[in-house]
Image (spheres, rainbow, N blue to C red):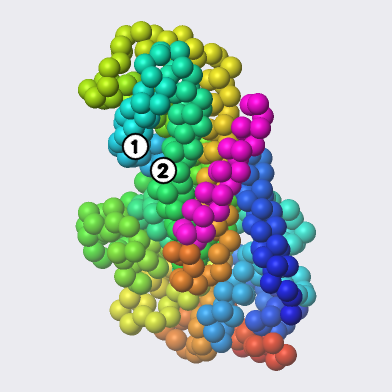
Amino acid sequence: MNALVTQMQNVRSEQFHCANLRLHGGEVGVVCVKSLEQGMAFVDAMMGLKAPMEGRVELLGTLLYELPESARLSLLARTCHVGGGLVSNLKVWENLALPALFHHLISAEEVERRLVAAMEQIQNKDDWLQNRLKALPDTLSTYSRRMVGLLRCAIQRPQLIVAEFLLDDLEEGPVDKLVKMLVWLKSQAPDMAVLLVNLGPIDAGHLALQNLKAAWIVELEEPHHAVSEKH
Amino acid sequence: MRPAHTHVLSSILSFFQLTAGIVVHAVTHLDALKRRSVMSITYKQIYFTGIQALLPVSFAAMLVGFTMETQMRGLLGSGIEINVKMLKLVVLREFAPLFTAFIVLGRSGAAIASELAAMKVQGEIRSLYLMGIDPGEYLIVPRVVGCCVAVPVLTFYFQVIVAGFGPALASMLVEIELGPYYQAIFNSITLTEIIASTSKNVCFGLIIAATACSSGIYVPTARIWIPQAAELAVMRGFILLLAGDACFALLMI
């Protein structure tokens, strides 16, 4: 079995009750949340933004809340968050390159090489290259913004992708394209773990989860409720 | 329920704490400028705060120079020495730094505050954290450095326009011997005065940037706070600039 990428033990916050999960390298896990606020609170607790009220959070082999903030931020450079707001005053291509270049993960030439390779997986590649990459994020559709998040992962090649509400509020077509890109990303880095945070329950037989070979689904409960885990 | 004056006092105290925190964070994280992406935003900030403000500063400086010269001649007569002394004390030392700082506060301070407030409301600051990027390094350091560089340069530009164009424009209405007047202005400026003026302008840049950043970044996450952040930045900056000017005036006595 691959190394443990993230682990939460009896983690409790104001938004959720007693989260327990273990995600290993190469695995895909799904966390179903009841509301946007709960999902964001879960991601914040897992990524070190806001310490939970109780419990133990481990990320990439380190107890997250025992680290100073600067070390926590360095650790996050090895992860990639998809679904958050893009920086609105940077063009899309600048957003794509930002974490990789800020943390000096790879050179600008390598960023370009990886982006070109990932672009091959997108159907309307020419439109992306000619228009969308040069645009400001506000002009993009929800689907395109989420695809930008995945393209950023393709550049960064992180150990963990946290996809926050990636498949929510989208038609079947865009969902298929996003899942296809995720599957391709996993094929490029077999040790990479993916954590999908989904709004509302999702069936284990969902085509997207079948394609991604999800290892487990956790339903997060509101405070004072137990967590159920389905394998 | 707390009395109103306690609430006001605690708000003022909290604002000073946040603004001082911004200054400390910016000063202790200056090494962030080694990162190309941070440096690139710093250049953009200098361009926006400094170069794009050249036109309004030029107009303001010409008008101030013209008005001051004509008024001084009417009040003090045509004596070169007294006019130069007045120009240096009132216009170059006091008026130019404050006027330039007010222009920068109205343009860049309001823009920085509303931009940061919008970023906070749209979740972009959270996204930066999740990318492992310290928003203090990425957002605050470039804005503070940008203002601290742009304000002294703009003020120097303002002073040159006031001292150069003001007498020239006024000479169309009142009698001024331009050659000896310029020579007297140039001869009267000392290195100490230049250093004091630059220090004061750097402080003004710091006040504008720190006030704007603290007004923008610490707003509640609701859209209604975006314009309010700009308003708060301008009002707080205005008062702090006047207070800063008074402190420098005391030091220069």
Query: Do the residues bearing badges 1 and 2 touch, measured as CB atoms within 8 Å?
Result: yes
| Amino acid type assigned to the residue bearing label 2 in the image | Ile
Magenta residues, as a range? B229-253
Q: Residues within 10 Å of mark 1 (few under 14, many from 20)?
A: some
Residue displayed at 33% across by 27% down = B70
Q: Is residue B134 magenta?
A: no
**In which chain is the residue bearing label 1?**
B
Residue B56 is left or right of residue A2, and the answer is: left
In the image, residue A134 above or below residue A65: above
Locate the N terminus of chain A by quadrant.
bottom right
In this figure, which residue is indicated by the disc labeled 1?
B60
Give the amino acid at mark 1: Ala
Dot 2 alpha-carbon crowd within 10 angstroms: few under 14, some 14 to 19, many 20 or more: some
> Looking at the picture, how far across and down is residue A98, in whole percent?
46, 50
The residues bearing labels 1 and 2 have C-alpha atoms spaced at a distance of 9 Å
- Reading the image, the residue beneath label 2 is B103
**Front in this rendered view, residue B222 or B156:** B156
Q: Position of residue A116 (x, y in %)?
A: 33, 51
Q: Earlier in the sequence, mark 1 or mark 2?
A: 1
Work out whether residue B169 or residue A118 is closer to the camera in this orientation and state it: B169
Looking at the image, which residue is at 27% across and 22% down?
B174
